[in-house]
Image (cartoon, rainbow, N blue to C red):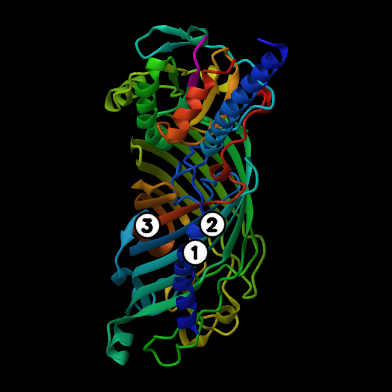
């Protein structure tokens, strides 16, 4: 089943890129939204030129660990012990997330574009047992695993203000959309060496979706002063009601500030300051709260087996910086490589801190027959044309 | 010469002119079409302007009165503009001796040094004017770069091109030469 999903995920882009040139026609024209004039790792930061498609494929790798509580790093040994609420039978050591993101966008007018994004996620989390479990299983720990399709995000971007159509120096746009629950909230253990644990629900962070329809709103500012481009993005994703497991994610807010410098007609350097806020989960999932999964002895009133099962051990505040560059080898094709490093993290309860994130993105612009880059700009009627 | 002979001579001259002019006109029209040039429905005066060139001299559109002008809008951040500049220079070298002008207006807001660098790099000898305030650009309704207008010797707009072109092609030379014969 998963092999088929994986196969389709990799075949689809190949088929697309084989046939994409048929749809392209490029007459050599610079326009307001042509090319990558904003960081591609920021959702909704940029939009295609009018009547053009933009397809994006990104590969992201995120490494997390070690544990952090508040603003201090902690050792696994600090929290390993009997599962009594303060110490746990199993503690996370490291997490690796591989995310293959695909997105498509189309601009209907000069001011309005619609976007769609979805990812295939693969999570691996190294877990360490306490002494009794190490003795009973004969191993120091195991690697927790989950994979699957993420939630599907649909976004619209409407430009409220622009001081110039061709080469704007200031633009303000509003973002609005929704995240649809195409991801899973029922992922279960499959590689746990502890008898009876396989088939029980995986912790929150290993799930690939939220399970709820979540509204998204945001505001973006884009500015430029040759050879600089800069901007700010604000995005809020609200989680307003409980999913089928009886919980919802904490509210999420994200601020991004970026500064880009064109160092070559085909190359741009990028710096970002990123801030995330995420609230705690509202409650335990049904399988934990009622069936006792994730608790010692399958007793819902007993302590958590791992801090990962506690909804209070999620979210917090994080500041990070990102550095990267964009490169446009030929018109209509753009590549970006960007790395993100945290500079400050204040996390709720013991949880894995972010270590680093790296993302490679390939962007393809496809003018349709209505695009200016297919037919050129219409000559102005005002001048007799 | 009898009346009849004079009449036959007139018919001969008219036919000769017709046979000579029609293919030329068709060739000119074909050149416009091949170059993807939009012709005006009604010919209007090109908006006048007065801009500084890269040497600080003031240049007016009226300075080119009596000559066909290829008026190009570009910017240093526009990659397709960069692609067509060399062919524009070659066109200028071919036709400037015949009284045909090539004028390019840079709409870069800042970094005028970069404009000068481009001029040096591409060895451009035709007039390069600066429109940092975008005033002239707006009078010419420029919505994408590069954009080129063709202006007749009488100062009327004769054509519009959106996007990059190969300006030293035979069609382009034919087209620019034909503008000399217009008003």
Secondary structure found at label 3: strand
Distance CA(mark 3)–CA(mark 2): 25 Å
Nearest to viewer (mark 3 / mark 2): 2
Bin the neighbour count of mark 2 within 10 Å (Cα to Cα): few under 14, some 14-19, many 20 and up: few
Report which quarter residue A124 is drawn in. Answer: bottom left
Bin the neighbour count of mark 3 within 10 Å (Cα to Cα): few under 14, some 14-19, many 20 and up: some
Segment tinted magenta in the rendering: B66-70
Q: Specify whether B74 is left or right of B121.
A: right
Secondary structure found at label 1: helix
Is residue A295 visible in the rendered structure shown here?
no
Which residue is tagged 1?
A: A19
Q: Chain of mark 2?
A: A
Which residue is tagged 2?
A: A23
Q: Chain of mark 1?
A: A
Q: Specify whether B4 is left or right of A34.
A: right
Disc 1 to disc 2: CB gap under 8 Å: yes
Q: Is residue A292 above or below residue B136?
A: below
Which residue is tagged 3?
A: A360
Image position, residue B159 (x, y; %): 57, 27
The one of A192 and A84 positioned closer to us in this rendering? A192
Image position, residue A30 (x, y; %): 48, 37
Q: Is residue A324 above or below residue A80?
A: above
Distance CA(mark 1)–CA(mark 2): 7 Å
Looking at marks 3 and 2 on the same chain, the residue that comes earlier in the sequence is marked by 2
């Amino acid at each position: 089943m998963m092999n088929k999903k994986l196969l389709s995920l990799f075949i689809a882009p190949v088929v697309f890129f084989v046939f994409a040139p048929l749809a392209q026609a490029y007459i050599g024209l610079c326009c307001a939204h042509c090319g990558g004039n904003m960081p591609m790792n920021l959702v909704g930061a940029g939009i295609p030129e009018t009547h053009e498609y933009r397809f994006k494929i990104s590969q992201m790798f995120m490494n997390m660990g070690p544990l952090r509580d508040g603003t201090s790093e902690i050792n696994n040994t600090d929290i390993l012990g009997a599962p009594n609420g303060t110490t746990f039978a199993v503690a996370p050591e490291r997490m690796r997330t591989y995310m293959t993101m695909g997105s498509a966008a189309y601009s209907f007018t000069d001011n309005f574009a619609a976007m769609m994004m979805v990812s295939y996620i693969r999570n691996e989390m190294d877990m360490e047992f306490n002494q009794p479990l190490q003795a009973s299983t004969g191993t120091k720990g195991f690697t927790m695993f989950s994979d699957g399709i993420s939630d599907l995000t649909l976004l619209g971007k409407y430009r409220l203000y622009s001081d110039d159509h061709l080469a704007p120096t200031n633009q303000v746009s509003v973002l609005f959309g929704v995240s649809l629950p195409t991801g899973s909230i029922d992922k279960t253990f499959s590689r746990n060496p502890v008898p009876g644990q396989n088939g029980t629900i995986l912790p929150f962070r290993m799930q690939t979706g939220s399970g709820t329809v979540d509204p998204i709103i945001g505001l973006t500012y884009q500015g430029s002063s040759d050879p600089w481009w800069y901007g700010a993005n604000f995005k809020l994703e609200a989680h307003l009601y409980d999913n089928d497991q009886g919980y919802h994610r904490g509210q999420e807010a994200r601020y991004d500030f970026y500064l880009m410098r064109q160092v070559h007609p085909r190359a741009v350097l990028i710096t970002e300051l990123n801030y995330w806020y995420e609230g705690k989960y509202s409650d335990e999932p049904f399988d934990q709260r009622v069936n006792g999964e994730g608790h010692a002895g399958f007793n819902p009133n007993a302590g958590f087996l791992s801090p990962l099962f506690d909804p209070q051990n999620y979210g917090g505040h994080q500041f990070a910086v990102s550095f990267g560059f964009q490169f446009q080898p030929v018109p209509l094709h753009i590549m970006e490589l960007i790395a993100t490093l945290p500079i400050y993290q204040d996390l709720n309860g013991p949880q894995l801190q972010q270590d680093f994130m790296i993302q490679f993105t390939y962007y393809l612009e496809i003018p349709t027959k209505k695009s200016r880059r297919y037919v050129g700009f219409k000559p102005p009627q005002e001048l007799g044309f | 010469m009898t009346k009849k002979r004079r009449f036959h001579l007139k018919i001969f001259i008219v036919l000769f002119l017709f046979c000579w002019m029609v293919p030329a006109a068709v060739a000119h029209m074909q050149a416009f079409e091949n170059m993807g040039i939009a012709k005006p429905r009604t010919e209007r005066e090109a908006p006048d302007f007065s801009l500084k060139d890269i040497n600080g001299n003031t240049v007016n559109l009226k300075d080119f009165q009596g000559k066909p002008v290829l008026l190009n809008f570009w910017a240093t951040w526009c990659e397709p503009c960069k692609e067509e500049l060399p062919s524009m220079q070659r066109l200028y070298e071919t036709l400037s001796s015949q009284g045909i002008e090539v004028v390019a207006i840079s709409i870069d807001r800042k970094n005028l040094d970069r404009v000068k660098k481009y001029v040096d790099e591409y060895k451009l000898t035709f007039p390069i004017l600066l429109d940092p305030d975008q005033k002239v650009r707006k009078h010419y309704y420029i919505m994408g770069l590069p954009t080129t207008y063709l202006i007749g010797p009488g100062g009327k707009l004769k054509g519009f091109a959106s996007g990059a072109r190969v300006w030293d092609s035979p069609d382009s030379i034919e087209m620019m030469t034909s503008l000399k014969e217009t008003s």
